[in-house]
Structure formats: C-alpha cells, structure tokens
Image (spheres, helix red, strand yellow):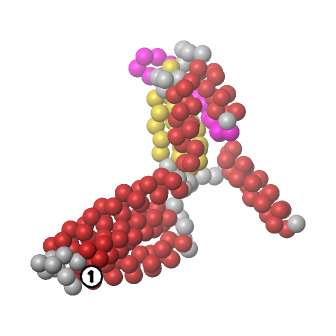
Amino acid sequence: MQIDLQMLAMIFFINLAYVTLNTLRFLLTMKGYRVIAPLVSMIEIIIYILGLSLVLDRLDNPLNLLFYALGYAAGVSIGIKIEDKLALGYTMVTVILPSNTDEEKSLPKILRQEGYGVTQSYGEGLEGPRLILEILSQRKSEKKLYQTIKSVEERAFIISYEPKYISGGFWTKKISRREQKIHQKNQQ
C-alpha cells in the first residue's frame, strides 16, 4: 500500500477547516448573528462535502479515515481557542461573600470603579449572613473580573452564566451612549 502524504495532508486540513468553521457557525448562531452565520455555513458545507468525498473515494486506505478524524479533532480544538479569543457576548457573574469581612464593603466599590455594573443584596448561608453581588461583564473581561474578585476576597464563591436577553440598567445605558457617539462621529 502506497502512502500519499499530499492526500493525507489535504484530507486533514480540509476537515480541520470544516470543523473550525462549524464551531464558529454554531457560536454565531447561538449569539444571534443572523447574517454572518448562514454565510459561514455555506462555506462550511462546501468544505465538508469536498473533504468527505476525498475520504469516501479512498476508503481502501485506512490512513485516509484516520487523518480525516485527526483533522476533525484538531478543528474542534482550534474552534474552542478561536471562541475563547472572540469571547462574544456577556456573562452574568454571581459572587457570594461572607458578610462579616471588610471586603464586603470594598469589593463592590472596587468593581464599580473598574466599570462593572454591580447589584448587591443580602442572603443567608449555612454559616450566617452573606453578601450577594450580581455583576454583568463582557466575556472579554471575564478572567480579569475573576482575578479582581479573588485578589480582594479569596473565599468568594463565584458562579457565572451567559444571559440570553439584557434590557435596561447600567449596561444598556452605557451601550446606547457609545452607539450615539459613534453615530455622531459618522455624521461629521
């Protein structure tokens, strides 16, 4: 059996491109990018059919299938890394602090000075009262937010999730002002 390295490389890279685009298209769809997601899907399906036909036409060589699978795995890995870099959207972070510390008063102030919208309330935990902070952050700032929280209060309990819909409040006003400034600059 003769090994065609050029064919193996082509199969690998075609599937790598397909799966990377598949991951991005899925993320764009989930984030509501209604124009770019279908365009990416068109390119994705062309690449998919091309790669699949190369493998199906050459099933006599198991290496073709192996390199197809390796390209798929590499595409998933690269897609995840690209998604981490893009960090589209927002994250909602809930922080629960023991309410018997000085950090209880300083953390919300520090976070507000850094530009985060912070809503605080109080709750009751197993070991007594707790301060609860709700913080909306751009996903690009998420790691920095966690570092800030942990640098102030190591014992902070942190939960995060991605909100589907945001309306009103601190962020909406901030985004509206930014869009108005951009619109005014474009008119000049």
Q: Nearer the viewer, residue 116 or 68?
A: 68
Q: Which residue is mark 1?
A: 54
Whether 8 is among the magenta residues is no
In which quarter of the view is residue 41 placed? Answer: bottom left
The stretch drawn in magenta includes residue 128: yes
Which amino acid, by three-letter code, is at mark 1?
Leu
Per the image, label 1 sits on a secondary structure element best described as: helix
Q: Which picture quadrant has residue 188?
A: bottom right
Residue 76: which quarter of the image? bottom left
Q: Whole-percent x and y of residue 101?
A: 56, 15
Q: Position of residue 63 (x, y in %)?
A: 18, 71
Which residue occupies the foreground of this view, 123 or 14? 14
Residue located 19% across and 82% down the image: 58
- The reply to whether residue 97 is in sight is no
Q: Residue at x 39, y 70 (%)?
A: 17
Relative side of 115 to 21, left or right: right
Up-down: is 156 above or below 76? above
Q: Quadrant of the N terminus?
A: bottom left
Classify mark 1: residues with Cα within 10 Å, few (<14), some (14-19) or many (20+). Answer: some
The kind of secondary structure the magenta stretch mainly shows is strand
Compared with 75, 160 (above or below) is above
Q: Is residue 181 left or right of residue 168?
A: right
Residues drawn in magenta: 115-129
Question: How many circles with numbers are drawn on the protein?
Answer: 1
Q: Position of residue 47 (x, y in %)?
A: 38, 78
Q: Position of residue 149 (x, y in %)?
A: 55, 30
**Residue 182 seen in render:** yes
Pick out the residue farthest to the left: 1
Residue appearing at x 56%, y 37% in the figure? 145
Position of 150 compared to 6: left or right? right
